[in-house]
Image (cartoon, rainbow, N blue to C red):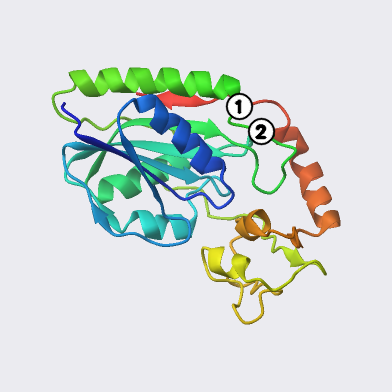
Amino acid sequence: MDIKKAYAVYFSPTGGTKKAAEILGAGIGVDVEYIDITVDAVERTFSEDDFVIFAAPSFGGRVPDEAKKRFMLLKGHNTPACATAVYGNRAYEDTLAELKDILEDKWFVTVSAAALVAEHSIMHIYGTGRPDGCDEISIKKFADDLLEKLKTMKSPVSIDVPGNRPYKPYGVIHLAPETGKECVKCGICANECPVKAIPFDNPSITEKEKCISCMRCTKVCPESARALNKDVLSAVQNKLREVCSARKENEFFI
């Protein structure tokens, strides 16, 4: 196939999925346009001559509902794609399968896929600093193999990916950040919240029924005024220690 343009579309509240998508995009070796759908949804149509990397974080082993809504605004025309699930060193479970189904429902063809590890968005002691140097090597090797496949492929053919259908029930540990006295009510967190769970007129509070525990507000706050309750965070870290401590390696499907 003659790929004329490459894109990388990502939903990345705390930056781990963005980092993984950028490493993969850089490995493709052609001009890549990056499309961030974390804060604002985008409607776009891609052609059969395009190649698109779709990167989503794994929330409880599933594609986050808000990311799903935004991916579904994008349309392909028999467009080859790489489904990429990024997870915090626990497990990606049904995320890849769900992401593939979302894409193929919108006329993309999943010719490749990857499950990549990034630093956990809530418990930073797990997957700290990832993707790291070793990850970059493996991702770039995958990108080389993918490029070779695209060059020799006459037409896109969908591949199988791990996961269950029906998917596991969507369920995450609901943790809404709290605001400390450091808050200066600058409103950056309200502007950056993907689901508008922080009121513009009172950014020191969080509307818990809207919050998706993505932790973007804790990432973008210039005063470090937003954080999870330390006792709650410690309890969750201990609960997940057994499944999150050992290093997981990236998985590739091509």
Name the residue nearer the viewer: 145 or 69. 145
Q: Quadrant of residue 91?
A: top right
Q: Is residue 193 in view from this perspective?
A: no
Q: Are marks 1 and 2 in contact (CB under 8 Å)?
A: yes
Q: Residue at x 63, y 57 (%)?
A: 220
Q: Residue at x 61, y 72 (%)?
A: 198
- Where is the C terminus found, in terms of image quarters? top left
Above/below status of 194 relative to 50:
below
Q: CA distance from mark 1 to mark 2?
A: 6 Å
SS assignment at label 1: loop
User: Picture coordinates of residue 112 (x, y %)?
Assistant: 34, 29
Residue extending farthest to the bottom is 201
Left or right of residue 53, residue 114 in this image: right
- Where is the N terminus found, in terms of image quarters? top left
Say which residue label 2 marks: 129
Say which residue label 1 marks: 132
Name the residue nearer the viewer: 37 or 173. 37
Mark 2 packing: few (<14 Cα in 10 Å), some, or many (20+)? some
Above/below status of 27 relative to 178:
above
Using the image, tell me which numbered label, if any, was put on residue 191.
Answer: none
| Amino acid under disc 2 | Gly
| Amino acid under disc 1 | Asp
Name the residue nearer the viewer: 99 or 75. 75
User: Picture coordinates of residue 130 (x, y %)?
Assistant: 62, 32
User: Picture coordinates of residue 149 (x, y %)?
Assistant: 26, 20
Above/below status of 12 relative to 193:
above
Name the residue nearer the viewer: 101 or 18. 18
Q: Residue at x 63, y 37 (%)?
A: 90
